[in-house]
Image (tube, helix red, strand yellow):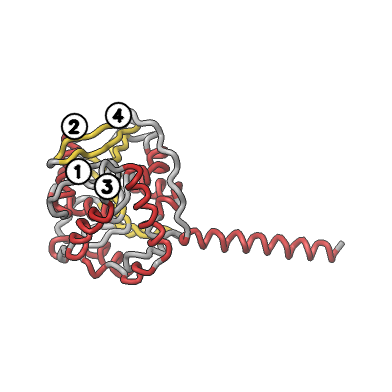
Amino acid sequence: MTRFLKALAFVTLFLISAGFASAEERWLTLPEPAAMPKPEQSGYAPVNGIQMYYAVFGAGDPILLIHGGLGHGDIWASQVATMSKTHKVIIADSRGHGRSTRTEQAYGYDLMESDYLALLDYLKIDKTALVGWSDGGIIGIDIALHHPERLTRLFAQAANVTTDGVDPGVLTNKTFAAYIDRSGRDYKKLSKTPDQYDAFVAQISHMWESEPAWTKEQLGKITTPTAIVAGDHDEAIKREHTEYMASVIPGAKLIILPNASHFAMLQAPDEYSQAALDFIDAK
């Protein structure tokens, strides 16, 4: 019996250890988004010369979710399912992304900011909380800088405020490469110009070469209650850059999501949603 108990204890310890190892390695995965709930409203908003796809879910104080570069709004499906229980949740596809069209106009974060503000105007939403991932977080910071009256709170995950905040290792990262590959496949399924992915990537890449480029002094003028958020294994943004952002934005809260990477909303959807709601709903 003693020998059996020792063997059982060993097997149990092994299984627990394997489980912990698996949990620790979820940051290496790129889960598929969940199925998007049925929206109360969806369509295309005519903004700044493009047709911008949007969808609205639930009721209550609004939350605008803005996806990252090359992505689309459906990436937020798990967050929509959770947040729309207590809030009106708005998703959209940024210009040229997903189902939204683009023009030949050069990309810039100010332009993308103006797209989202025009969408809010179209939906008659004066003020909203904003959850932004990567480019979406940068767009959120842009709004906080130039139109703070439109925001209640900003939850900016995996954003950068200068180009040197990007980790050059991202160029050879397998998870990020898988995301780019998946984005290309999604583009072909969703876009009105399915054969123009390479042209779209080339166009937006010009923006990434020089933007964003905000100074410490500019960031120090932000008045919107802000959370600067990162997965503890972010492949794209340097940790010291994330910490710098949190240190120079007045009153910013630094949130590090455990066992998660640049794609935390897919890898840890429940924890991500709860962290965002805890910040947005804090009194």
- Residue indicated by mark 4: 41
Q: Residue at x 34, y 33 (%)?
A: 57
Quadrant in which the C terminus appears: top left
CA separation, marks 3 and 2? 23 Å
- Disc 3 is placed on an element classified as loop
Q: Residue at x 33, y 57 (%)?
A: 229
- Residue indicated by mark 2: 124
CA separation, marks 2 and 1? 12 Å
Q: Is residue 264 above or below residue 273?
A: below
Query: Which numbered disc, 1 or 3, marks the residue closer to the eye?
Result: 3
CA separation, marks 3 and 4? 20 Å
Check disc 3 and give the amino acid type. His
- Disc 1 is placed on an element classified as helix
Q: Position of residue 76 (x, y in %)?
A: 37, 44
- Precedes in sequence: disc 4 or disc 2: 4
Return the mark for residue 97: 3
Category of crowding for the residue at label 2, using alpha-carbon neighbours closer than 10 angstroms: few (below 14), some (14–19), many (at least 20) = few
